[in-house]
Image (cartoon, grey):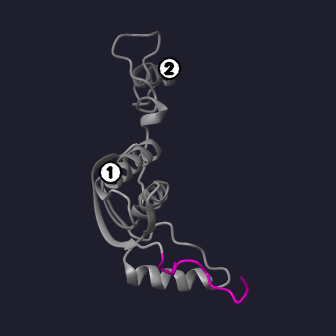
Amino acid sequence: MTDTGERNTSQTLQKDFPGDGAAGATRRGGGAPGTRGRTTIADGVVEKIAGLAARDVEGVHAMGGGLARTFGAVRDRVPGGTKSVSRGVKAEVGEVQTALDLEIVVEYGVSIADLAQDVRENVIAAVERMTGLEVVEVNLAVSDVKLPDEEDEEQPQGRLQ
């Protein structure tokens, strides 16, 4: 330092950024680029992933309870309306874990125990692969059974067949 208290630039650089590979030198930026910052995943994102994964399992007829399916069927018929892939799915998302509740309608004749296992496996694999979150539980509620002779309320009914 000089008598006036001014710092020499080379001394500042030497002190703040030790070069020459000295022991104890730290990397600028605080670590690997992949660890800088925070990623948050909305509940709705996990709900969509889980809903699509559950629908992919053979034997799942629909998602959601009767009232939700009825409103969904009406909304699907409105021009420009989109099908809600998260209907029947509720997610609680934390920083590293998530828990899911699914409400499903099963096809008649399908083993519910086997279907539940298949749905859990498919949902857990999809959510963990896409989000990196640990799925701690997938709770299933079977709200209805689709009988072969029942009319499908989710299919739009036009005047022409």
**As drawn, 60 above or below 32:** below
Residue 30: x %, y % from top left:
41, 32
Q: How many marks?
A: 2
Quarter placement of the C terminus: bottom right
Q: Identify the residue at image location x=31%, y=67%.
A: 142
Residue 148 part of the magenta-drawn span:
no
Residue 129: x %, y % from top left:
44, 42
- Give the residue number, with chain letter if any, for mark 2: 10
Task: Between residue 75 and residue 143, name the one nearer to us.
Answer: 143
Is residue 132 rendered to the left or right of residue 77? left
Q: Amino acid at mark 2?
A: Ser
Q: Identify the residue at image location x=40%, y=21%.
A: 15
**As drawn, 146 above or below 159:** above
Q: Identify the residue at image location x=44%, y=10%.
A: 21
Q: Please, what is the dominant secondary structure of the magenta stretch? A: loop
Q: Secondary structure at mark 2?
A: helix
Q: Secondary structure at mark 1?
A: helix
Task: Between residue 131 and residue 71, name the one nearer to us.
Answer: 71
Residue 157 part of the magenta-drawn span:
yes
- Give the residue number, with chain letter if any, for mark 1: 114
Q: Amino acid at mark 1?
A: Asp
Residue extent of the magenta highlight:
149-161
Quarter placement of the N terminus: top left
